[in-house]
Image (cartoon, rainbow, N blue to C red):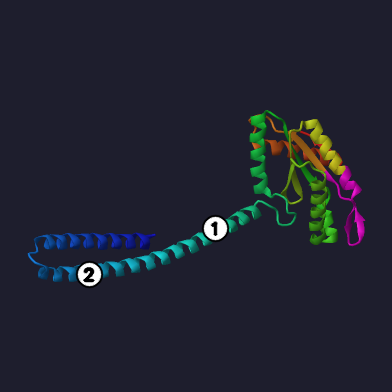
């Protein structure tokens, strides 16, 4: 951009100088007594015209080069914007399961809360935790533990509505967002997920393994902070753990 402005300034100065020269030559032509006095004027005009033409040619070449640089820069900017967008999407998703991560969940929860407030519709969240997950890791190794998380994720995604969201809240904890759903129906939805998980055995080293989870469900109250709603669901989930696991408790 600086080069472009400098070249425009040079063109302006060259044009201004040429204009001044033409005015002087015009005055000399007007005051000439005979044609013999015009030869020097014509020669000067031709010389100045050639100089301006050469400046204009160089300016055209320079501006064409600058335009090419701008186009290359725009192309690079577009590439970087695409990479930035892709990177932003990656940091919102858990690399192991492909679902939302904590950051993505926080953003999704804030959006759903704002939407529920605008529409005055219910919004429920479910926080679930895999039962005895440490035992799975200790007995079969972390690779099997990772596969168990992926298995749970697939079952949950296959049994949620299109408008629902699920993300990995941390470790073996998952958060489910259920818009336009009252708390009773949210509890029923989590219980359906438990049944679906029971019907789809997880294979660990060629052996069938039953994976279960305990969950707490909370309806987000009007003007309630997202963290407060998650905390209530978390407390309900731990009540389900203490009650014998593989249960769903209402906050």
Which corner quadrant holds the C terminus? top right
Relative to residue 126, is residue 195 drawn left or right? right
Picture quarter with the N terminus: bottom left
Q: Which residues are magenta?
A: 195-213
Q: Judge left or right: residue 60 versus residue 48.
A: right
- Residue 245 shows in this picture: no
Q: CA distance from mark 2 to mark 1?
A: 47 Å
Query: Could you tell me which residue is drawn at 90 percent across and 52 percent down?
Result: 201
* Above or below 217: residue 140: below
Residue at label 2?
Answer: 46
Image height check: is 145 above or below 188? below
Front-lying residue, 107 or 63: 63
Disc number placed over residue 183 in the picture, else none: none
Pinpoint residue 154: horizontal percent, then vertical percent: 81, 51
Quadrant of the image occupied by residue 109: top right
**Residue 84 visible in this rendered orientation of the protein:** yes
Q: Is residue 168 left or right of residue 187?
A: left
SS assignment at label 2: helix
Q: Position of residue 243 (x, y in %)?
A: 85, 38
Residue at the disc numbered 1: 78
């Amino acid at each position: 951009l600086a080069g472009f402005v400098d070249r425009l300034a040079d063109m302006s100065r060259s044009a201004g100088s040429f204009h001044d020269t033409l005015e002087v030559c015009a005055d000399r032509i007007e005051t000439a007594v005979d044609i013999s006095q015009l030869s020097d004027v014509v020669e000067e005009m031709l010389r100045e015209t050639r100089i301006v033409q050469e400046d204009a040619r160089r300016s055209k070449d320079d501006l064409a080069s600058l335009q090419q640089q701008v186009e290359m820069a725009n192309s690079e900017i577009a590439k970087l914007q695409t990479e930035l967008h892709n990177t932003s999407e990656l940091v919102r998703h858990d690399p192991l399961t492909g679902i939302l991560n904590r950051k993505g969940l926080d953003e999704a929860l804030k959006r759903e809360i704002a939407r529920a407030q605008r529409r005055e519709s219910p919004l429920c969240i479910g926080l679930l935790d895999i039962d005895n997950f440490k035992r799975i890791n200790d007995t079969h190794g972390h690779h099997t533990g990772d596969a168990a998380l992926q298995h749970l994720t697939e079952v949950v995604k296959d049994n949620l509505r299109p408008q629902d969201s699920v993300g990995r809240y941390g470790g073996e904890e998952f958060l489910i967002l259920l818009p336009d759903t009252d708390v009773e129906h949210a509890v029923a939805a989590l219980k359906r997920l438990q049944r679906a998980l029971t019907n789809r055995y997880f294979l660990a080293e060629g052996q069938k393994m039953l994976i279960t989870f305990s969950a707490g469900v909370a309806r987000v109250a009007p003007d309630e902070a997202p963290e407060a709603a998650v905390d209530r669901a978390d407390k309900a989930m731990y009540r389900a753990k203490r009650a014998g696991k593989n249960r769903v408790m209402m906050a």
